[in-house]
Image (cartoon, rainbow, N blue to C red):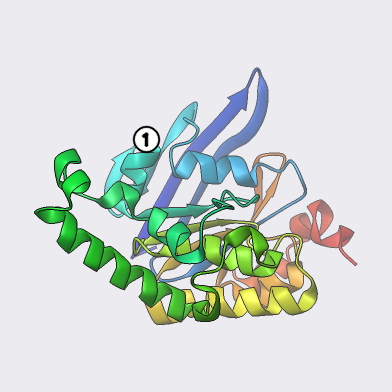
Amino acid sequence: MADALLRLHDVSLAFKGITALNRLSFDVERGEICALIGPNGAGKSSLLNVINGVYRANTGDIVFDGVRFERIHPLKAADLGIGRTFQHNALFGRLTVIENVLAGLARHGRANFLENIFRLGRDRAERRSFTTRAHRIIAFLELDPHIETVVSTLPYGLQKRVDLARALVADPKLLLLDEPMAGMNQDEKAEMSHFVSDVNEKLGTTVVLIEHDVGIVMDLADHVVVLDYGRKVGDGTPDEVRNNPDVIAAYLGTVH
């Protein structure tokens, strides 16, 4: 691809001799939505963990926005512009929506300890800037009515949207979404799909997402990569993947 934001080349990962990813290579073009699909245990979440540095690949390398690395620390990944949500919410249940969203900026502060304690120097400007950014993302995701609500009291679908807001508030170039619609009913899935599309189109964020609902994937994604036991068995547009016999055999043929 001429303008790939993310390139993976021959990435392999194994745990105690069990292969999770097997010589995986593909590109994600800047500005696209790329969906990762495949059966449970196909290696999808492991791949996201390699991209943002939670796991270190045994072989291969990754190029993100022109920077090549074999392993990147999660903090460095965040600094470079890689945001991430997880399959299971990791929200602070006793904090409000805005407090959870502001937590997404905690690693980006430059004020030192004394400035934070006494609210001097850079601390004041950062607090104003961070609060403005949090309010902007909360409004974008239509969470305004819940801004001061304790997160644990919100319905599950809204909690997932708060998780999305926390990942977005730092303005990532690449957003990794690990099953953002898991556990949702069809109406909630349609709503979240709409917001993911808006994040891509209106904010210009490149998205890589894991999703099991093939109907959602085919409507939402520009690019689909299919994994089966750590191997890539499909890579292309939704139409190309839909008609790929290897994909049908590995995954799509099992979906009714």
Residue 29 visible, this orientation: no
Instruction: Tell me the element at label 1.
Output: loop
x, y percentage for residue 28?
45, 60
The part of the image, by quadrant, that contains residue 23 is: top right
Horizontal arrangement in the rendering, residue 201 relative to residue 85 (left or right): left
Label 1 CA crowd tier, 10 Å (few <14, some 14–19, many 20+): some
Residue 75 visible, this orientation: yes
In the rendered image of this protein, does residue 163 appear above or below residue 73?
Answer: below
Quadrant location, the C terminus: bottom right
- Pointer 1 residue: 73
Q: At 74% across and 41% down in the image, what residue appears?
A: 41
Q: At 59% across and 72% down in the image, what residue appears?
A: 221
Out of 156 and 19, give the one closest to the viewer. 156
Q: At 63% across and 69% down in the image, what residue appears?
A: 158
Q: At 64% across and 51% down in the image, what residue appears?
A: 87
x, y percentage for residue 247?
75, 57
Quadrant location, the N terminus: bottom left
Q: Residue pushed farthest left?
A: 121
Out of 83 and 102, give the one closest to the viewer. 102
The part of the image, by quadrant, that contains residue 178 is: bottom right
